[in-house]
Image (cartoon, rainbow, N blue to C red):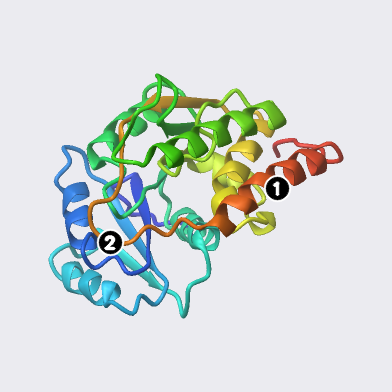
Amino acid sequence: MQSETRTVDSVVIIPTYNEKENVAAIIEAVFLLPRKFDVLIIDDNSPDGTAAIVKDIQTRHEGRLHLIERPGKQGLGTAYIAGFKWALSQGYEFIFEMDADFSHNPNDLMKLYEACADGGADVAIGSRYVSGVNVVNWPMGRVLMSFYASRYVRIVTGMPINDATAGFVCYRRRVLETLPLDNIRFKGYAFQIEMKFLAYKYGFKIVEVPIIFVNRVLGISKMSSGIFSEGLFGVLRLKWSSMFTKYGRK
């Protein structure tokens, strides 16, 4: 059931696992923006006490900061799917994905919002590669891997998107209402690709907004070779299955 008294139309979903060094600061940074965004933290039973920090902050931001605690580490994709479903049930119009580690600048939420609310986009992607390579403090090997992974995705899928693996995104609710969320197959690196691919195949307007991506300063990266492999081979599976699938909005 949708909320009938919602006054804030946007929610920022931030999955966390062992983010005690960053979670309080990222929440407060979002709340300091000139327009109102609610925040939903989805914590996968972080052993470092991330959820406890969020609960403490909730006492100062009643009704604006929300928390879903899950019993274990279940993957980025399932965290976002849970967040999407919650956000839809609460009546939000603009639903955002953002990392907890400040690799995404909270100020850029405003640009993604404007691209959808004022610019007519259904999906706005905070893109590292739409205007060159805008990545700070990553090792060169990782920059090249990420850049060419997005090129590979573009060639295989045909999507006109420069940063298909980006995790800084705004969706209008009609996109998430249309996509078959229960059928999303990937949990890690390929989740971001699959979501954009489906939005593209369903005919939604996707725009890329240039951002500068900054490597985390605090905490430990969750990237692994297994996550990258899922993306590499998952793209081929997506393309193959799409050849036998009809895409149409209700």
Crowd around label 2: few <14 · some 14–19 · many ≥20 (10 Å): some
The residue carrying mark 2 is 219
Q: Which mark is residue 233?
A: 1
- What amino acid is labelled 2 in the image? Gly
SS at mark 2? loop
Quadrant for the C terminus, please: top right
Q: Earlier in the sequence, mark 2 or mark 1?
A: 2
- Residue 213 at what x, y percent from top left? 33, 37
Crowd around label 1: few <14 · some 14–19 · many ≥20 (10 Å): few
In this orientation, which residue lies closer to the viewer: 158 or 79?
158
> In percent of the image, x 64 and y 37: which residue is there?
197
Q: Determine the image quadrant of residue 140.
A: top left
> In percent of the image, x 48 and y 53: which residue is there?
88
In this orientation, which residue lies closer to the viewer: 220 or 54?
220
Residues at marks 2 and 1 touching, judged by CB atoms closer than 8 Å: no
- Residue 16 at what x, y percent from top left? 36, 64
> In percent of the image, x 84 and y 36: which residue is there?
243
Distance (Cα) linking label 2 and label 1: 29 Å
Q: Determine the image quadrant of residue 68.
A: bottom left
Q: Which mark is residue 74?
A: none
How many numbered dots are placed on residues in this image? 2
**34 over 23 or under it: above or below:** above
Q: Determine the image quadrant of residue 114.
A: top left
- Residue 111 at what x, y percent from top left? 31, 29
- Residue 34 at what x, y percent from top left? 16, 37
- What amino acid is labelled 1 in the image? Phe
SS at mark 1? helix
> In percent of the image, x 34 and y 41: which residue is there?
138
